[in-house]
Image (tube, rainbow, N blue to C red):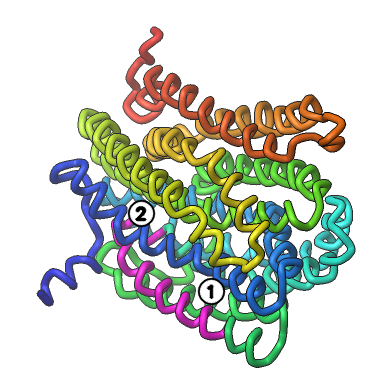
Amino acid sequence: MLDSIKKLFKATDMTVGVPWKQIVMFTLPMLIGNIAQQLYSTVDSIVVGKYVGDNALSAVGSSAPILNLLLVLFVGISMGAGILVAQYFGAKQREELSYTVGNCITLTAIASGIIMVLAVFVTRPLLVMLKTPESILDWCHGYLLILLVGCIGSAYYNILGGILRGLGDAFSSLVYLLVATIINIILDLLFVAQFNMGVAGVAWATIIAQAASAVLCYRRLTKMMEHFDMGIKYMKLNKKFSMGVIKLGLPSGLTQAIMSLAMITVQSLTNSFGEMFIAANVIVMRVDGFAMLPNFSFGTAMTTYAGQNVGAGKKDRVVQGAKQGTLVAVLTSSVMTGLILLFGKQLMGIFTDTTELVELSRNLMGIIAAGYIAMAVTQSLSGVMRGAGDTLTPMWISLFTTVGVRVPLAYLLVHFSKTAELPQGDRRMVFVSLLCSWLLGAIVTTIFYLKGKWKKIAFGEPMLER
């Protein structure tokens, strides 16, 4: 038993063993960890919805697009770090791995400083630009400012967690995140229910808990010295490795930035339907966060799997794992979708006692439920392409489906659904546009995966079309 537990904390070599088993075993602890991380924002929403009110719930949720926009630097660094670490680990190149880890630590410090400064100047103007209702504007601003000024904990957890996953250790970050989640829940209830700190209370609880998880991840990394070295020498920015991380991570970070801007654009449309629809959108997005976790977890696992096997030069194994991993992801997402449809009312009731809000949220979730199966395909195959070094193709696909399809389609569908009874249009069209973009994304991603540009980048193999 003790040996089995110890094995979970060791780096996983995904270049050997049955592909789907390796992918699933790597995904499971990461999935649990992602669920725990999602609890940060979900518990915030539940606590303020139950103890402060529906408007406070709207305030917390309305902040999400701006929060995502200003944190995309970390997304880019984390993605680039995970890919390089996985490839160097798979190739057993200790020196290169050491420089990659050290440069990631330094880049994160720089990115955190930029975010902290920007937060002070841009949060309120962005909220005003989004036509945030006056009734929740101050709550939104206070919540965002605390989270962004205290972003260093979240930044380092994500970056160090990405490094650990690249090394094949998804279990350690899971344990530390579970500890941090418990801290967050306790502090949420203490600050809001006992100290009446309102929306600001959940923000303080979150950044304290995130800082704890970052410290624990760093301690774990220092105990993995059999794979790499740490020291000032490796933390000094080195053009080869820092630019390598940025080059691989920038497409992902840029994609997230543009997608966040698209979300902000759609958020402006959402806000035009009033506080009730804003609150319903928050509830749906919180449940959506959990529904997407298997897809994102499999996508990240496929990136690590592909990265390690590309580093080891095992082309056939990458292709085999892509097929098996995608199939498992689709089956998992299908089960998740069925549960959402079956227990929709109970899920929505966790966030609010307002019957009208529960019914509206359940109806909106029903519109997009089938899209999660499509996203299983998109995330899995995109993960393979990224792990092989082709980060641009998934970026362009995401930009096309989100900016080129979802945003204009949302406005067009709402506009053409205007009637005498619905002078502002049918608010459900906001979610119909989201479903359409997800379905199209799965189709386009599959086509580009089969064309094989990622094989050419990873192995020098000509594309299928040639």
* Amino acid on which the number 1 mark rests in the picture: Gln
Quadrant in the picture for the N terminus? bottom left
Asked whether residue 373 appears in the rendered view, the answer is yes
Count neighbours of disc 1 (C-alpha within 10 A) and say few if under 14, some if 14 to 19, many if 20 or more.
many
Q: Which residues are magenta?
A: 163-187
Asked whether residue 116 appears in the rendered view, the answer is no
211 over 303 or under it: above or below: below
For residue 315, what is the image quadrant? top left
Residue assigned mark 2 = 166
Q: In terms of sequence position, does the residue under pointer 2 or pointer 1 come before the other?
A: 2
Query: What's the distance in space between the residues labelled 2 and 1, CA to CA?
Result: 21 Å
Residue at 44%, 55% in the rendered image: 100
Q: Is 224 contained in the magenta span?
A: no
Residue at 41%, 44% in the rendered image: 337
- Residue 190 or residue 79, whichever sits in front: 190
Give how far across and how far down residue 156 sits, in percent: 52, 67
Residue assigned mark 1 = 210
Residue at 30%, 44% in the rendered image: 305
169 over 185 or under it: above or below: above
449 over 136 or under it: above or below: above
Give how far across and how far down residue 246 sits, in percent: 56, 47
Count neighbours of disc 2 (C-alpha within 10 A) and say few if under 14, some if 14 to 19, many if 20 or more.
many
Residue at 82%, 36% in the rendered image: 422
